[in-house]
C-alpha cells in the first residue's frame, strides 16, 4: 500500500530516557533520598519537573502543560519504575488535536538530572542508558493494519492477518536498536452539531524505537553516556524515516 512515513504526519511523540543502576535504587529503601532528589529536580529544572507525588511504593514527578484552547494536562516526567529511573519528556500529544509540548534541550536536562542522581547514589554503578522514542504516525482513513501487512510477501498472510506487531532488532555501532511497529485505531471528534459530535474512525501506526548501549558497563563514563545520546538523536532525526520507507 502506498504510504510514506513523514515527520509531518507525527501526531504524538514522547521521548524517554531509562537508566539501569546496580544495585537498584528502591523507593522502599531509599525513599528519603529519592524525595530529596525529586525536590532538587523541581527546584533546578522547573521547565520539566513541577510536582512531587509520593506513595508507599512509588515516587514520581509530573509537569502541568498548557494546551491549545486553554486546557491543561499533567504528565509524568520522572518515575521510579521496577527497572529503574525513567525520565519522560513529551514533544507532542494528541488531545483533541496535535499539541506541541516540546521541552527544549531534553538531552541536556537528562544529563544534568543523571549527574545529580549519580552524585547522590555514588555507591551505585550505571550499567546502561537507553533512549526511547514513542511515535504515532497518522494514516488518516487508510487502514494502518493493511499498510503494515503490505510489507508481508505472501499474499495469504496479508489476506488473513487480523493484527500485527513487528519487532525488529537491528544493532549497529555497538548500540541496540529495537523497533516495534503496530497499528492503532483512533476515534476523533469531527465536525458536527455540538449536541451530537460526529465521531470519525481514523488510523495510525505506532513506532517505538529503543536505543541503548549493547554491552553492560561496570560504570558508564560521561563520554559513553554522550555517545548513546548523540547516536540516538542522529538515528531518529536522520535514519528512522529512511528505514521505515525502505529508502536504503
Image (cartoon, rainbow, N blue to C red):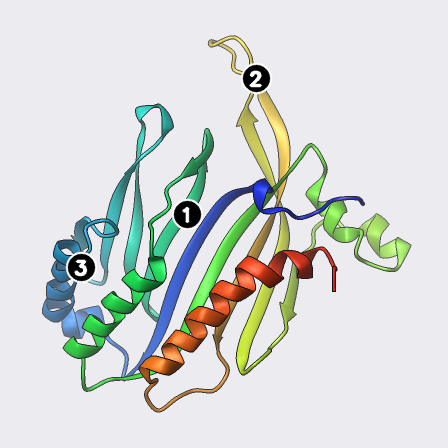
- Alpha carbons under labels 3 and 1: distance apart: 19 Å
Q: Earlier in the sequence, mark 2 or mark 1?
A: 1
Image quadrant where one finds the N terminus: top right
Q: Nearer the viewer, residue 107 or 49?
A: 107
Residue designated by label 1: 91
* Above or below 177: residue 76: above
The outermost residue toward the bottom is: 218
| Contact, mark 2 vs mark 1 (Cβ under 8 Å) | no
User: On the image, numbered disc 2 is attached to which residue?
Assistant: 198
Q: Residue at x 80, y 51 (%)?
A: 150
Q: Are marks 3 and 2 in contact (CB under 8 Å)?
A: no
- Would you say residue 158 is visible in this rendering? yes
- Image coordinates of residue 98 in percent, x first then y, are 47, 35
**Disc with the residue nearer the chain's start (3 vs 2):** 3
- Closer to viewer: mark 3 or mark 2: 3
Who comes first in sequence, dot 3 or dot 1?
3
Front in this rendered view, residue 156 or 192: 192
Q: Position of residue 228 (x, y in %)?
A: 44, 74
Q: 10 Å neighbourhood of mark 1: few (<14), some, or many (≥20)?
A: some
Quadrant position of residue 77: bottom left
Q: Is residue 164 above or below residue 28?
A: above
Q: Residues within 10 Å of mark 2 (few under 14, many from 20)?
A: some
Q: Give the residue displayed 40% in from the left and 60% down from the top.
A: 16
Query: Viewer-proximal residue, 166 or 170?
Result: 170
Q: How far separated are the C-alphas under marks 3 and 2?
A: 43 Å
Residue 19 vertical placement versus 43 (above, below)? below
Q: Residues within 10 Å of mark 3 (few under 14, many from 20)?
A: many
Residue 139 disc label: none
Amino acid at each position: 500500500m502506498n504510504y510514506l512515513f513523514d515527520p509531518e504526519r507525527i501526531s504524538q511523540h514522547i521521548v524517554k530516557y531509562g537508566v539501569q543502576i546496580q544495585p537498584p535504587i528502591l523507593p522502599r529503601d531509599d525513599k528519603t533520598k529519592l524525595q530529596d532528589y525529586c525536590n532538587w529536580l523541581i527546584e533546578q529544572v522547573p521547565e520539566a519537573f513541577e510536582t512531587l507525588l509520593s506513595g508507599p511504593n512509588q515516587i514520581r514527578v509530573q509537569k502541568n502543560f498548557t494546551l491549545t484552547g486553554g486546557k491543561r494536562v499533567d504528565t509524568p516526567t520522572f518515575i521510579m519504575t521496577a527497572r529503574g529511573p525513567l525520565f519522560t519528556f513529551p514533544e507532542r500529544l494528541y488531545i483533541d488535536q496535535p499539541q506541541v509540548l516540546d521541552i527544549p534541550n531534553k538531552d541536556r536536562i537528562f544529563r544534568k538530572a543523571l549527574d545529580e542522581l549519580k552524585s547522590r547514589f555514588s555507591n551505585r554503578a550505571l550499567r546502561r542508558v537507553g533512549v526511547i522514542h514513542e511515535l504515532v504516525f497518522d494514516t488518516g482513513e487508510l487502514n494502518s493494519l493493511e499498510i503494515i501487512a503490505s510489507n508481508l510477501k505472501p499474499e495469504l498472510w496479508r489476506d488473513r492477518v487480523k493484527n500485527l506487531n513487528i519487532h525488529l532488532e537491528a544493532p549497529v555501532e555497538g548500540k541496540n536498536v529495537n523497533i516495534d511497529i503496530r497499528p492503532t485505531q483512533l476515534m476523533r471528534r469531527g465536525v458536527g452539531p455540538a449536541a451530537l459530535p460526529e465521531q470519525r474512525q481514523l488510523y495510525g501506526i505506532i513506532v517505538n524505537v529503543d536505543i541503548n548501549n549493547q554491552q553492560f558497563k561496570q560504570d558508564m563514563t560521561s563520554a559513553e553516556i554522550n555517545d548513546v545520546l548523540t547516536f540516538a538523536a542522529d538515528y531518529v532525526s536522520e535514519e528512522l524515516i529512511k528505514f521505515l520507507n525502505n529508502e536504503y
